[in-house]
Amino acid sequence: MSETGSLYADLSRYYDQFCADIDYVSQCNFANRAFLLFVDSPTRNYLDLACGTGQHMQQMQAHGYTTTGLDNSAAMLAQAAVRCPTATLQLCDLAEFTQESSFDLITCFLYSIHYSHPTSALQQTLQRAWTALKPGGLLLFNAVDARGIRNDEGVSTTLPDEEANLHFQSAWHYRGDGDVLDLHLRIARQSATDLQQWHDHHTMTALTFPQLQHMLAQCGFVVEMLEHDYSVLRPWDGYSHNVIVAACKPAGANAS
Ligand SMILES: C[S@@+](CC[C@H](N)C(=O)[O-])C[C@H]1O[C@@H](n2cnc3c(N)ncnc32)[C@H](O)[C@@H]1O
């Protein structure tokens, strides 16, 4: 198993600083609301896919969930272990986890489901999530429709560090057809005497929402597409190219 680039390996200690603008509290309040709406279970066993440094697990623990985090970066999981010492952590690819009927809720945020590449791996990830959910459980993740990806400069952040300025730029590029979605991460660390630069390239999976809905239905999920707005839980308007997907495993479903 290979790690997914320098940001998630040797730069993992900076990850939380680059994500300082991400509202993990709102995302997890939303996840808890969705859980209460869609799931009828006395237990709260929770798995976060591509958990990174464990920010969602930390918030979900505060909501009373027992947490497991999965990631294919040992360095990111090392950060998660410090943040969430009681969490179970699993070093594993998204398409390879093998739990059965274990979780009431599975999430995958920050578009990380798209890291399953190619499309067959993404289908495998969704199938693994289906198997890992208890009947009646919920898979919640955000996704982007390939037809709405803008090839622009992306998101850029500059952070003062103790001895240097850190500059972080993240941009998607989609060629217009096929399932390859390129993610370019550029990181620079400028001190008084030195400039260090890194460039990560990740190949992610591009797909349309109808393709995604079809893949989820093939697993057996009942799917609700929701607006990509963590402040309010409401149905997708059918137009925007970002959604939050709530995929329910019906209560009567077999685990396999
Ligand atoms: C953008 S970060 C998101 C981390 C976390 N979910 C958050 O919102 O802060 C993506 C994470 O996915 C992990 N990742 C990328 N590809 C993966 C794969 N194929 N299997 C498991 N984890 C993967 C990376 O190591 C990284 O921790």
Image: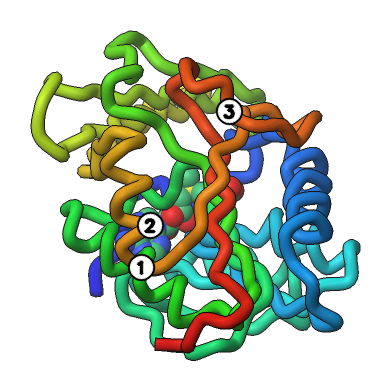
- Distance from the alpha carbon under mark 2 to that under mark 3: 17 Å
Q: Quadrant of ligand 1?
A: bottom left
The numbered dot on residue 216 is: 2
- Distance from the alpha carbon under mark 2 to that under mark 1: 5 Å
The numbered dot on residue 154 is: none
Residue of label 3: 236
Q: Are marks 2 and 1 in contact (CB under 8 Å)?
A: yes
Task: First in sequence, mark 2 or 3: give its number.
Answer: 2
User: How dense is the environment of label 2, judged by Cα within 10 Å: few (below 14), some, or many (20 and up)?
Assistant: many
Q: Is residue 225 above or below residue 160?
A: below
**The residue tagged with tag 1: helix, strand or loop?**
helix
**The residue tagged with tag 3: helix, strand or loop?**
loop
- From the viewer's perspective, is 121 left or right of 225? left
Q: Which residue is at a point 74% across and 66% down the rendered structure image?
A: 39
Residue 51 x, y percent position in the rendering: 56, 61
Which residue is more in the foreground, 211 or 196? 211
- Distance from the alpha carbon under mark 3 to that under mark 1: 22 Å
Q: Quarter of the image containing the C terminus?
A: bottom left
Residue of label 1: 219
Q: Amino acid at mark 3?
A: Trp
Which residue is more in the foreground, 66 or 183? 66
Which residue is more in the foreground, 218 or 48? 218
Q: Amino acid at mark 1?
A: Cys
- From the viewer's perspective, is 171 left or right of 26? left
Q: Which residue is at a point 21% across and 43% down the rendered structure image?
A: 203
User: How dense is the environment of label 3, judged by Cα within 10 Å: few (below 14), some, or many (20 and up)?
Assistant: some
Q: Which residue is at a point 46% across and 29% down the rendered structure image?
A: 189
Residue 113 x, y percent position in the rendering: 40, 51
Residue 141 x, y percent position in the rendering: 54, 49
Task: First in sequence, mark 3 or 1: give its number.
Answer: 1
Q: Splitting the image into 4 quarters, where does residue 207 fall?
A: top left
Q: Are marks 3 and 1 in contact (CB under 8 Å)?
A: no
